Amino acid sequence: MIIVGNGVDIVENSRIKKSIKNIKFIKRIYSSEEVKKSKFKTDKVSYFAKRFAAKEAFVKSLGTGFRKGINFSDISVVNDKLGKPFIKINDKIKSIILKKNRFKSFKIFLSLSDQDKHSIAFVILSGLKK
């Protein structure tokens, strides 16, 4: 596998704290799965801020940003049974990645962190050429 992209994003938690008060913002940015899981989180600001940063970092790793029909809602950040975060994407984005890079397969690596004022995400996109 070769690395074809990386992305990093940092967000001020206070910005997300204000934004998540608006239901339209939540529906536009977060998947229904993310919203559902947020109900069980005590620190909703951190939860949503890390996911926002992850989505931004992911589109940077693609090299496209939010263009070519890519939307925030196409990307979900979920956790495995041990709590490790990973990015879940829909078929539209899978197709973009495979075609753009001429990959047979690919992997997305995600790391999240936060402190009182900021949340950060780092993404690496690697793939296996055809």
Image (cartoon, grey):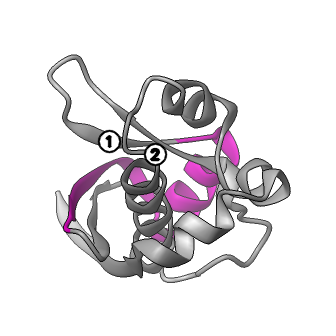
Instruction: Identify whether 121 is placed above or below 64.
Output: above
Which residues lie in the magenta part? 89-115
Question: In this view of the protein, which residue sits in the foreground, 96 or 104?
Answer: 96
Q: Residues within 10 Å of mark 1 (few under 14, many from 20)?
A: some
- Name the residue beneath numbered marker 2: 44
What SS does tag 1 mark? strand
**Residue 80 at what x, y percent from top left?**
26, 24
Q: Quadrant of residue 45?
A: bottom left
Residue at image x 62%, y 51%? 95
Residue at image x 71%, y 65%? 70
Describe residue 28's horizontal placement relative to residue 125 as left or right. Answer: right
Residue 19, numbered label? none
- Name the residue beneath numbered marker 1: 86
Question: Residue placed farthest to the top in the image?
Answer: 81
Question: Disc 2 marks which amino acid?
Answer: Lys
Query: In which quadrant of the rendered image does the C terminus lie?
Result: bottom left
What SS does tag 2 mark? helix
